[in-house]
Structure formats: structure tokens, C-alpha cells
Image (cartoon, rainbow, N blue to C red):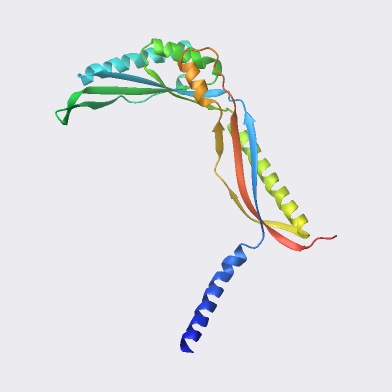
Amino acid sequence: MRSLSHLLLAMSLLTAAAAPAIADTTGIHVNGSGEIRAVPDMARVSLQVRREGEDAAALKSQLDEVTANVLEMTRDMGIDKRLVTAAAVNIHPRYRPRDGETELDGLIATRSIEIVLEDLADVSPLINRALARGVNGVGGIQLDLSNRASLEQNALDLAVDDARDEAARVARRFSVALGAVIDVSVDQHDVRPVMMEDATARAADGGTDFSAGELTIQRRIRATFEIGGSADP
């Protein structure tokens, strides 16, 4: 009997402890999403410069020369200097295998140059001219929208409307009134690029048929609404 009493007491305590958590989840729980697709109007281009050799000072000088030529090119193209960022030179050793071990085989120097283009028509010309001035390759092209903030807000408004409409449908099907919203959780921003890889490849190959495709901006929320009394028939 003592063991049974202890068991019943433990179950009662667990039930009491769980009661607030159950109460907190009472309501109509719904998800809402809003999506907007838009053609990007700007791009961030990452150019990569790489040289190999044995003299660190000589390698840095080579990279500095290429960078200076690229910066002059951007000025000639009318790109504002605030939109151009040249990272510091990075030099690290290169090794090769020998007799089951590795030995020093020179140095590798790299530098990246990030350029924001406010006109997508400049993407292919920029890459072609940069390659002609000693740039080794394109690290990537990130497409973006100059009015992204307002589009994200519009997508969030759509997500809120979607959640509210879903909750109203659920309440109507259960013949109850939809109460006030009591909890909302907003997911992080989600921007999905479309055709990014194809666009990058065509530009890097020197093509003139650069196509930006579309960006999809999506916002998601989770909301909980109170359940009112029975709805009027």
C-alpha cells in the first residue's frame, strides 16, 4: 500500500507540473507564409587573384599590381569606390609529398576583390575586363535587390494574412469563434536565388547573355489564436 500511495502521489505531482504547459498550448495553431518573386537589379561580384612562387615580397607586388589595375578599371566604368573592397593579401606555404613526407614547395598568394554592381548590364563586361587585367577567376556572383527591405515587409504582410485566414478557416470548420492572437513566432528571412549558378558560369565564360533570373523572398510565421465560444449558426 505504501508503494501504491507513493506511485499515486508521484503521478499527481507530474500531472500538476504538466498542467501549465498544456494550458499554454491551448488555442488554434497555424502557419503562414508569404512569397514574392522579383528580378534582381544589383549584384556582388567576387574576383579572385592568385599567384605562386618563392618570394613573398614579389608575390605581394604582383597581386598589388593586379588590384591597382582592377581598381582603375572600376573607376573607368563609373563604379563608385565605396562599392569596391579589396581584401588583404593572404600568403601561405605550398607543400608537396616526397619520400612519404611533405616538404615546402613555394608560396601561394591570394587576394579577393568584392565589387557591388548597381547595373546588371555591367556584370559580363566587368568580369571580362578583370580577367584581361590578371584576375584568375570569379569566386561568385550574388544577385540582390535594391528594394529588398520593402519586399521582405510585403512578404511578411502576406504571411500574416495567410496565418489569419488559415485560423479563420479552422475555427469555422469547428463552429467556434476565432479569438485574439496570443502568440506569434516569425522565422528568419529567406531569400532563394534562382539560376545563380548558370548566370555565374555564363558571365565567367565571357558570354554576353547574362540572365539574372529571379529571387524568391519568403517569410514564414507561426501563430496561436484563442478559441472563442460556439459560433452563431
- Name the residue: 73% across, 48% down: 165
- Residue 97 image point, x, y percent: 19, 27
The quarter of the picture where the C terminus appears is bottom right
Asked which quadrant contains residue 224, the reply is bottom right
Q: Position of residue 158 (x, y in %)?
A: 68, 41
Q: Left or right: 52 with respect to 23?
A: left
Q: Say above or below: 92 vs 27.
A: above
Percent across and percent down for residue 7 are 49, 81
Q: Which of 24 and 69 is in front in this view?
A: 24
* Residue 31 at least partly seen: yes
Nearest the eye: 182 or 178: 178
Q: Which residue lies furthest to the front in this view?
A: 100
> What's the residue at 64%, 43% (across, down)?
33
Q: Can residue 78 be seen in this view?
A: no
**What residue is at 23 percent from the left and 23 percent from the top?**
107
* Res 114 → quadrant: top left
Residue 85 in the figure: left or right of residue 39? left
Residue plotted at (50% across, 14% down): 124
- In the image, residue 230 sits, relative to residue 131, either above or below, namely below
Most extreme residue toward the left, as rendered?
99
* Residue 142 x/y as whole percent: 49, 27
Disc count in the image?
0
The part of the image, by quadrant, that contains residue 220 is: top right
Q: Which residue lies furthest to the bottom in this view?
A: 1
